[in-house]
Amino acid sequence: MVAAVENSIAGIKAVCNGCCNCGTCHVEIEPEFLKITSPMYSGEKQVLTKLKNNQAGSRLACQVIVDEKLEGMRIIVR
């Protein structure tokens, strides 16, 4: 989320500044990368269940820890 905001990625509003309570950094991650992203905790799950466009690959960008194993990952901004 921080990288998206710093690079003016359209659709990432990050209203809560990464506190995992607004859902404005909702993204969909490719299935092959979803399984190697940082684990989803209950607070993120709770926010995602409130979103109309929640998908199987949905995550909040503010909760995904980005490191070298995610190189090449593409996401859809929801």
Image: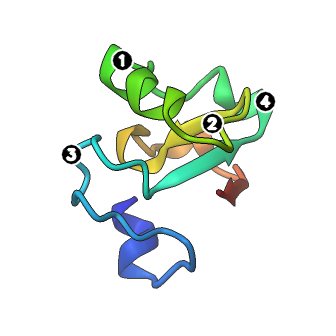
Where residue 54 sits in the image (x, y, percent)? 65, 36
Upstream in the sequence, badge 1 or badge 4? 4
Labelled disc at residue 19: 3
Which residue is labeled 2 in the image?
58
Residue 16: x and y, percent? Answer: 23, 57
Relative placement, left or right, of 33 versus 31 is: left
Give the vertical position of 46 relative to 24 (above or below).
above
Question: Residue at (45%, 56%) from the top-left corner?
Answer: 25
- Please name the amino acid that badge 1 sits on: Tyr
Q: Which of 61 and 73 is in front in this view?
A: 61
User: Residue at the location (36% across, 79% down)?
Assistant: 6
N-terminal of the pair, mark 2 or mark 3, is 3
Q: Do the residues labelled 1 and 4 touch (CB within 8 Å)?
A: no
Query: Three-letter amino acid code at disc 4?
Result: Pro
The residue at which mark 4 appears reads as: 31
Quarter occupied by the C terminus: bottom right
Q: Quadrant of residue 14?
A: bottom left
First in sequence: mark 2 vs mark 1: 1
Most foreground residue, 9 or 14: 14
Tell me which numbered mark, 3 or 4, is placed earlier along the sequence: 3
| Residue 45 position by quadrant | top left
For marks 4 and 2, give the one nearer the viewer.
Answer: 2
| Label 3 crowd bin: few (<14), some (14–19), many (20+), radius 10 Å | few
The quadrant where residue 36 appears:
top right
Camera-near label (3 vs 4) is 3
Q: Please state the horizontal and vertical placement of residue 60, each as a whole percent of the image.
A: 46, 43
Q: Are marks 1 and 3 in contact (CB under 8 Å)?
A: no
Q: How far apart are marks 2 and 1 (CA)?
A: 13 Å
Relative placement, left or right, of 30 versus 52 is right
